[in-house]
Structure formats: structure tokens, C-alpha cells
Amino acid sequence: MSQKLKNKIEASDTTINSLLKDQKFTIDYFQREYRWQSKHIKLLIEDLTSTFLKSYSTEDKRKDVVNYQSYYLGPVVFSISPDSGKKSIVDGQQRITSITLLLIYLNHLQKNSDHKVSISELIFSEKFGEKSFNMTDEMREPCLKSLFETGEYTLSENDDETVQNMLYRYEDIVQTFPDELTREILPFFIDWLIENVVIVEIIAYSNENAYTIFETMNDRGLNLTATEMLKGYVLSNIENKEQRTEINDLWKREIQKLHQYNDNADQSFFQAWFRGKYAVSIRPGKVGSIDQDFELIGSRFHNWFKDNHRTLLDLNTSDEFYTYFKNEFPFMVKWYLKIWDAQTEYTPAIPHATYINNWGIAESLQDPLLLASINIGDTDATIMKKIDFVSRYIETFTVRRAINYRKFSQTSIKYTMFNIIKLIRSNNLDLLGQNLTNEVNKIQEDWQGVLEFGLHGQNRKFVKHLLSRISSYIDNIVGKDTTYVSYHHPTGKQFEIEHIWANKFQEHSDEFDQENDFQRWRNLLGALILLPSGTNQSFSSDKYDDKVKHYIKENTYAQTLNSAYYAKNPNFLKSEIIKDLNFKAHNDFKSNDIEDRQQLVQRICEKLWSVEYFEN
């Protein structure tokens, strides 16, 4: 390769279609792990689908998609080896992996459609009957292959962080992708995704140049952020020099606290604060509608503040600016970070914050909801109760939707949640409890959905959440001090979902003629429990008669299958709640036993998520 070519750098805007079609590239060693979290993939889906829906009209033909609004996904940096000519991705593999997972899901959605869009070649290329995926990494291959072919993948002990995250983010896509885009609109969306989502492709012909570009792009540089522009505007409205210096110092301290959590936490904070406490409008779901408070705060909150502080925040004078940011700003930062802490580490006073961190809604809605009701004059105990109440509502909403196989994507619930934000804004605790009780009672999906609910390849994350909640709840009734974390993500040995029936269709031929009927019953929620990973593996294929003897050593919910448990546990037998739930042992475990257990789960859910919780 000539020195001239080696020093060459090319940059051009391109589409997902052009970037991925029949392409192959390796992943550089220093960034092989795929580390996107649930919030990242949910935000991407939210951004993509909302941008598409701004342009879509039911009157459009597919050819009209070319004129739809574009979406900028960001830059991707490639290096082409001077020796082998192989293309490696230096920066952008997190986004490309995520887009690949989305394409796999979309390909499944359109399988039975009469208007398929050709996207399989964006996911893999095929030679001599062998599929190979666009990002070549042997650790990813089995997971990608299984997801592409079946939409499911079973994790093994050998799977690394990347494979686990790929599976979990695929499940997030399944849960988050809006229902309204899964029908006749789907080909329009796929066309838009692969042709109107813009990427800047940067190609360097030497590793040295590629790494230099990577470092430059990941350096914060001197560009002012929205937070810094907001700060400048706020300080310009404080006339007294001492007060201005005081707020400037305070601002630095509070932003530093936020940055200790995440480099972008300051921007997420201001979006949550302004949406939760002040936004009064949201863009209607019609083509051509103009962005309102909710969207403007999400995109340019500094400009929104500049345009609305007089009318919505009642900030007009220098003293008002000074007093407001001296008091309200650090107060809201404090509780935003306390919520963050409670979500990531179980806090007994705010337990539901942890639950919704694992099974909640999009952060763009969830964070404003959590901040909406709190007031600077509230005691700490009141604020924690408020945060827990709102978290409780969010979890109740998501669980009831999930057991009825309903999604809760941002686009499908944002109007409901935005109205609740306004409803509970600055409520006292009694009013908050009343309002949330009323909102729970309005949820259309009821607990009867449990009777038909079971495990499938794309809801394992939710089933683990549900069983963790049930298992810890029953433990607590009988006096055990386990928590949700004890089952969902304990330190040390993990818990896994145990099928009470072994996967042996032939052993159930007396009840089932077809294996798919057997599998449906085997996967029903009433036929599942949680067991420690080693225990689960050691006797997962045993017959029920042998398994039930082991269950007596496990968590209370598992123990209740064994008749011996009922003879020696007075706390269990004397509990009025247990009597109301009507537990019973199962000496055998046939389909009618699963049915009984399914009804038990419904009763547990009704008790566990009762609106009585909101009574102060």
C-alpha cells in the first residue's frame, strides 16, 4: 500500500442499507464487549419510532417514505488493514450491534407479511449454504444465529457479557417496539429505517489514523452542552455579583455530583426535572404536529427554559432566579440521585424503585413521574413514600400489561403517563395515594391474564422478575427476611427458572396427544418456580415424585408444593394472608394441578399488588 493511500481518510454520509448490505467487518480487541443497557436500547427505539411517526400518514404510499424526516444515528469509524484488506470497526459497534438486533426482530415480524422488505442480507451474508454475520466474532455467532432463526436463545455458562447483553437487549426490543408499527405500517418503517437513518462512515487506511479519529471523537472538546448554555442564561439573569458567584459555585458542585453517576446524567436530570414539574403540553400523534413542552425539553431544554421560565416557572426577577436555583436546584439533584441509588441498590424505604429498575417503562417517562409529586417542603420520609408510591404504580401497570401480553412502549403509553405526571404534580401524600389508586383501577388489563400466562423465548426477563416478587413476598409472610434481590440478582449463586415438569413429552402422553400442547402447559407460570442454579441443573430432568422431595429445602413458594411443609410450619399455617390465598400441597402434578397453581398465582398477584398499599 502506498504512503499516500495509507494516510488517506474518507468520510461520507450513508444509509444502514449501504453500510451493512453484504458487508463483513471484525471488531477491534479493545471494544469487543457489547455493553448497552436496557435504557440505551429503549431510547434508541423511542427515538427511531417517534421520528418515523412524525412523518407517516395512513394516506401515504411506500414510495413517499423517501421524503420522510431523516434520523442521524452518528458516525462509525472503520480501519482497512494495509495487509489483508479486512475492514475492522474502530468506533460504533455498540450502535451497529443494536441495529443488527433490531433488524433481526423486524425480520421476524414480517415473516408472514405479503409485503416483505429484503433485510436479511443486512444481517448476514451466505456462501455455500453457510451464514456469517456482518460483525465477525465467534462468541456472538451462536446467539445471532439462534435469534435470527428462532427469535430465541438459551444462555449457557460459557456465554460472556456480550452474548448475555445481546439476548437481554433483544428481549427489550421485543417488549419496547410499538404495537402500532407491527401491522400494515411495518414495511414503511423498515424502508425508512434502512434508507432514511443516516450514518457518517469514516474510513482510515491505517490503524494509527483510525485510533486518532476514535480518540478525537470521544474527547468532549470545547462545544457547550445544553447544561452549560442553561447555566450561562441563568447566571446572566442574576444581577448581584455575589449571588451570581454563589450560584455558579453551587452549579459546579451539583453538576459534579451528577457526573459521578454518568457523563450525561446532568442532561437526563434537567429533562426529568422540567418535564416532571413544569411541562403542560405534549405533541399530538398526528403527522405534521409541532413539538410541545415534552419534546422540546427532551431536545433543547435550555431553549425551552429560556422561552417558558416566566409563564411556567414564574421566574422574572434577579432575586427570583437566585432563590429558585439556590433552593430548588440542589433539592431536585439530591432526590434525583437518591432515586438512582434506590433503583440500583435495594432500599427498604423505597423498594419499588428497585423493581422498576428491572421492570419499568422508558426513562423519558419514568424519571419525570418519580419527580413530579415531590415538594421542597416535604419531609424525607414523605418524599421516600411518594417515590415508592409512584414506583408502585409503574410496576403495577407494567406487570398487568405484561401478563396480558401487552407491550408498554413509549409511543403507546406516553399520553397516559404524561397525563398522570400532570395529575400527581406536587400532590400531598394523601392525594397522591388517592390519584394512584384511581389510576390503577383504570388499567384495562386485569389479573385474570395470569390464567393463560406462561414462559416463552422472549419474556424470560419478566418471568424472572415476577417469580422473584412472588417468592420474596411469600417468604416475608412467614417471617423470612429475604428480599426481591435475594432471588432476582443475589451476590453469589444465582437463581434460575425451574420447570416443575421435566422436558419429557413421553411421560405425559396420558394427558397430551400433541407435544406443543404439553410444552404450553409445561411453560405456564403455575408450573414454574425459582431454584439456585446448581440445584436447578442437578434434578431438572427428574420426575416430579423425586423433585418435590428436594423442594422442601428451597424457598417457601417451592416448599408449598410438598405436603410435609404443611405439618411443621406454624407461621405459615396461622397466617391470615396464607389462609386467604388458599395454598395446598400437590402430591402429584398433572395439568389440573398446574391449573390450581395458576389460580393461586392470580390470587397472590391480586394481594401483592393491591391498591391498599396506597392508603397512607
Image (cartoon, rainbow, N blue to C red):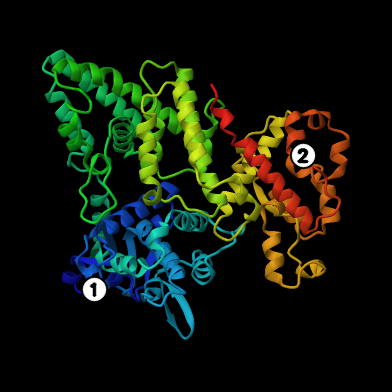
Q: Which amino acid lies under the numbered mark 1 shown in the image of this protein?
A: Lys
Q: Which amino acid lies under the numbered mark 2 shown in the image of this protein?
A: Asn
State which quarter of the image contains the N terminus. bottom left
Residue at position x 18%, y 28% from top? 311
Eye-nearest disc, 1 or 2: 2
**Picture quarter containing residue 248?**
top left
x then y, percent, for residue 151: 52, 66
> Element under label 2?
loop
Residue that carries the numbered disc 1 in the rendered image: 63
x then y, percent, for residue 384: 48, 24
Q: CB of mark 1 within 8 Å of CB of mark 2?
A: no
201 left or right of 237 in image: right
Residue that carries the numbered disc 2 in the rendered image: 582
Name the residue furthest bottom. Answer: 128
Instruction: Decide which of tag 1 and tag 2 comes sooner along the chain.
Output: 1
x then y, percent, for residue 141: 50, 68
**Picture quarter containing residue 15?**
bottom left
Q: Is residue 30 above or below residue 518?
A: above
Residue at position x 79%, y 42% from top? 559
> Element under label 1?
helix
Residue at position x 26%, y 67% from top? 59
User: Marks 1/2: CA distance?
Assistant: 60 Å
- Depth order, front residue of 139/303: 303
Q: Is residue 570 above or below residue 517?
A: above
Residue at position x 53%, y 56% from top? 160
x then y, percent, for residue 398: 50, 45
Look at the image and tell me whether residue 76 can be seen.
yes
Q: Is residue 478 above or below residue 292?
A: above
Q: Residues within 10 Å of mark 2 (few under 14, many from 20)?
A: few
Look at the image and tell me whether residue 344 can be seen.
no
